[in-house]
Image: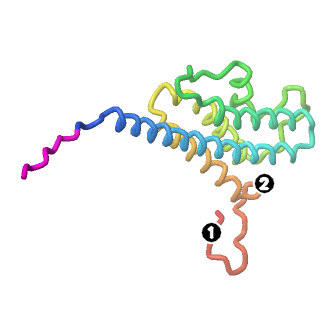
Amino acid sequence: MTDPITVPRVKDTGDSEEQEQRERQHAVNVLLAEAGEVGRVAAGWERELAARQAQERHRRVLERAADAVERAAGREVVPGGDGQLDEELAYDLAADIVTGSPYAHALPELAMGERIALVAVCALAAAMPHTVLGDLERELPALAATMDAAVTARRRRSPEGRPRRRREGSSVRHD
């Protein structure tokens, strides 16, 4: 009897490289989806601020900012893209959002903490598309987490800026 000849298997690096590429692409897609969701939540909060405005002009400015946040945190983050915001989008995310419409007779009805969070959310959204030029996997989650924290912190407070009271029997602090 002769012993069977065993042929050593040649490692197919093509398959493992393809698998790694698919896994990396999946991880990037998850990050993009998470950032987009955080942007949608932040935009929803900004729409709540807009709905409270007595002056229609301020309401429209805040709604445009909400749309811009949602867009910048979502479909503007394009791996392989140039990472730049178009001029209109950058304008809608500018820090002067806290002054509302220049054609209104007064400032928007916002508490100071809401103004601070609003500027933070807009600045973070404006920075998100640029992450495709650097380390997207490190930078985008940091920006999204910071945006989420800004919105969460403001939602825990009343419109007047005071901490919301704890519900009877609740051990969760909302301040």
Q: Amino acid at mark 1?
A: Arg
Q: Quadrant of the C terminus?
A: bottom right
Q: Position of residue 55 (x, y in %)?
A: 92, 38
Q: Position of residue 90 (x, y in %)?
A: 68, 24
Residue, x 56% and y 20% (percent of image)? Answer: 82
Q: Amino acid at mark 2?
A: Pro
Residue, x 66% and y 76% (percent of image)? Answer: 170
Residue 61 has which mark? none
Sequence order check, earlier mark of 2 and 1: 2
Residue that sits furthest to the left in the current view = 1
Q: Is residue 172 visible?
A: yes
Between 24 and 17, the one nearer to me in the picture: 17
Q: Is residue 138 visible?
A: no
Between 18 and 8, the one nearer to me in the picture: 8
Q: Position of residue 155 (x, y in %)?
A: 71, 55
Circle 2 residue: 159
Which quadrant holds residue 17? top left
Which quadrant holds residue 115? top right
10 part of magenta stretch:
no
Residue, x 62% and y 71% (percent of image)? Answer: 172
Magenta region: 1-9
Q: Secondary structure at mark 2?
A: loop
Residue that sits furthest to the bottom in the current view = 169
Q: Residues within 10 Å of mark 1 (few under 14, many from 20)?
A: few
Does the magenta stretch mainly form a helix, a strand or a loop?
Answer: loop
Q: Position of residue 168 (x, y in %)?
A: 72, 79
Residue 173 has which mark? 1
5 part of magenta stretch:
yes
Q: Is residue 37 left or right of residue 83?
A: right
Q: Is residue 45 left or right of residue 139?
A: right
